[in-house]
Image (spheres, rainbow, N blue to C red):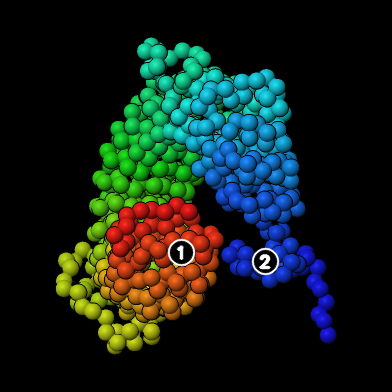
Amino acid sequence: MESPRLPTEIISYILSFLHVTDRKEASLVCKSWYDACQDHQKNVTFKFPVSTSSLDFIRELARRPRCGLVISRLDGSSLSRRVLLEVGLHLGPRLDRLALPGSSITEASLLGLLPHLTGLRKLDLQGLDSLFMSGAFLSREEHRRQVQNALRNLEELDLSDLRYLSDLSFNRLTSCTPRLCSLSLAGCHIAFEYDPYRGCPVGFGSSALVSLRNLLSLLQKQASTLHSLDLSRTSITPESLRSIAQVPGLRLEDLSLRGCKELTDYSMETLCKHQNGLKRLDLSACTELTSRTVLAVATELKELRSLSLSQDWKITDKGLAELMMLPCLRSLDLSECLHVSGADLVKGLSSPQPRAQLETLSLRNCAYIRDVVMFSLTQLLSRNLRELDLTSCVCLTDLSFHAITTYLPALVVLRLGWCKEISDWGLLGMVEPTKNCDPRDKEEKPRLVTEEDLGAFRDQEGASLLALRGLQELDLSACSRLTDTSITQVLRFPDLQRLSLSMLPEISDDSLVSVAHHCRSLTSLALNHCPQISDQGMARALPLLHRLQHLFLACCDTITNETLSIIALHCERLRTLDVSMCKDITVHQVDLLQFQLPFLEKVQCRIANGADFTMVL
């Protein structure tokens, strides 16, 4: 007897309990399940390159109430024009977001599309130099009226990395977007003080550059709505930043100044004073900033939620205690702040006053971080921390790993690459018999884990890596003391999506097969410089990793063309493959793989059998 068909709403409710990757699998079962899965993805973004098959895909999207598109490799061809025509015809007002990366489209093609996109909220024109090279974009009044009617509700505009953006073209475009909430000019040539083309101070109406005066004019006009600004990788000067910070009525919540190397502590103090409502601030690679900036942030920005100070090499521990007293702070990036030891982080988090509830912490390349600090930090951050990056904290040992697995069971992302003192004992949650538990004791000669030790591990209730049950990303690259002994016992995470075991010379096919059996949700697997990984191991593992999209096998000497044949057979979703320096891989087999895998976008094959190239498909 045929079972009754369940209503879409009931199927949708049942599928709502599945992880998003499992819902994707479920959507392939039948049409009714596919329709039910769409209810959980009412406003998603689809990414695809221009091709003849993309025409039918766009028509299928017409059934969706809202969606976003990222279309790559558009050019002046008839196929690209047809794709844009189909987007305007079938999606039109239902298109919420549009990005065109890696494209070189004509002004006529874009102007033919934009008037149809009356519901657009985000437009990404990053790197589309072909639109602005002539300087005539939107020069005709009728075109501006049509685009203004379509983009009147646009909230986010990304103009990053446009070499030919000028005052004239900038003004024409932004006059069509009166309600901007977010503007990105990252990497653009902005004349803040001096116009190199005219050889004089910046004036209005530059035909070759965007000027500070023109940018200030826009900020004044849209001060009531604009809350996010990205000026990363520009030559902004301290004086220019102070001028922007003091625009009347401007209340920024999100500001990115990544890579702005001329900024000073004084300009940051002015910024913090006048824009004290900032919630997200990125000061990465602003190399002149010191702890004065940290103190200014801690004093003025009481609503700050995310702060990045990555690669600000002059910053020390000073001010970090005060920073930890910001009650709204959720994300802190101190990567490559080489003088930070973490002692003041502990001091601030130990304060009885309201303190930061960090969910994300990066201490990558902070070489002064020690076990004693990690013991304190893990206990103080135990409630909320979800992402921890300790890459290249070379002084950390198994004792820090024990603290992490004991006090941070809610971790989703853990990066420990190049922490070379971490061993099998740490992953197994055991104390090496030759070591004392005091983290200040000096290291003695390590002892290998035996079968007897493994028996004790299986009987114990201590906190091994298995305690981090929700782990979705794990990086153990270059932790060279790790072997099959621990990898086969503790890498058992059904939700793990990204794993790096690169540069672990002691692991073999046994580890690879064990990972494949117990971590079947993997989408990215890195095994670079693992000399014992072979074709036989790949043949046993890859059939179990149906979701794999990125595979890195550089410098795996025993990998041959046989592995490429296995990949073609079992990895239909693969998008990235690195077989650099694999001496027994041939160019012919790599070329054949290109035609066998429909989603493969990039193959790195440097000096493979004499060749030296990177193939972007």
Residue 16, percent from left and from top: 67, 65
Along the horizontal axis of the image, is 34 left or right of 473? right
Residue 560, percent from left and from top: 35, 71
**Looking at the rendering, in which quadrant would you find the N terminus?**
bottom right
Q: In this view, does 198 lie above or below 135?
A: above
- Residue beneath the point at 57% across and 22% down: 136
Residue assigned mark 1: 592
Residue assigned mark 2: 27
Residue 313, percent from left and from top: 28, 40
Residue 573, percent from left and from top: 53, 64
- Crowd around label 2: few <14 · some 14–19 · many ≥20 (10 Å): some
Name the foreground residue: 547 vs 473.
Answer: 547
**Amino acid beneath label 2:** Ser
- Crowd around label 1: few <14 · some 14–19 · many ≥20 (10 Å): few
Dot 1 lies on which element? helix
Quarter where residue 288 is shown: top left
Residue 556 seen anywhere in this rendered image of the structure: no
